[in-house]
Amino acid sequence: MKKQNLIETMKGIEKKDFQYNEDDRAQRLLNIFEEIEGQLNVSHVNSTDHVVAWHKHNLQTDYWVCIKGSFKVGLAIPRYSLKKEEGEIYDVEWEYLSDKQPKVLKIPPGVYHGYKALEPGSILLYYLTHKYNPQDEFRANVGDFGESWKTENK
């Protein structure tokens, strides 16, 4: 019996395609395991010129891990004690994710976030606690928080 036939005849084994999306910023594998409660995605980023920012969620928590290369991650955190006429004031903090110092970055609801790859071919693995819901995504423009995505010369 060929291997293909054996797999097809065994109970419980399934093969499913998952969503692929590509634009000028990244190549993405989305909702890899439909059966899990949240959503597991992978972004492969070739360009170090593009900034993928800003958005936040009110329900979803993100968990990010760099599995190849490195990323500059922006986090715009609301400063709850101060309000300006048109809305909340945000402080921008920077985190760096790299395959050379692996760590998981947890991004809770209410925090605007985005990234820029620092190396071509960088890969970001991210877990979302909820399936993607466009009603739970709120966007802002790059520069809205007075931030600079440029890498400083030191």
Image (cartoon, grey):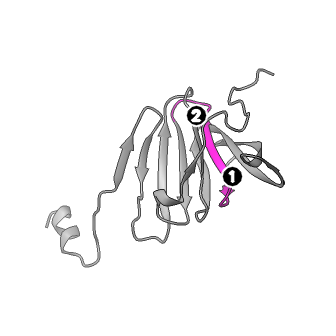
Segment colored magenta = 104-121
With 142 as the anchor, is 80 left or right in this view? right
Residue drawn at x 41%, y 64% as measured from the top left? 33
Label 2–label 1 contact, CB within 8 A: no
Give percent across and percent down for residue 142: 62, 35
- Say above or below: 60 vs 26: below
- Tag shown at residue 94: none
Near mark 2 (Cα within 10 A), the count class, few <14, some 14-19 or many ≥20, is some
> Which mark's residue is nearer the viewer, 2 or 1?
2
Q: Amino acid at mark 2?
A: Val
Queried whether the magenta region covers residue 124, the answer comes back as no
Q: Position of residue 66 (x, y in %)?
A: 60, 46
Q: Amino acid at mark 1?
A: Lys
- The quarter of the image holding the N terminus is bottom left
Q: Disc 2 marks which residue?
A: 51
Q: Is residue 44 left or right of 54 when viewed as pictured?
A: left
37 or 69: which is nearer to us? 37
Earlier residue among tags 2 and 1: 2
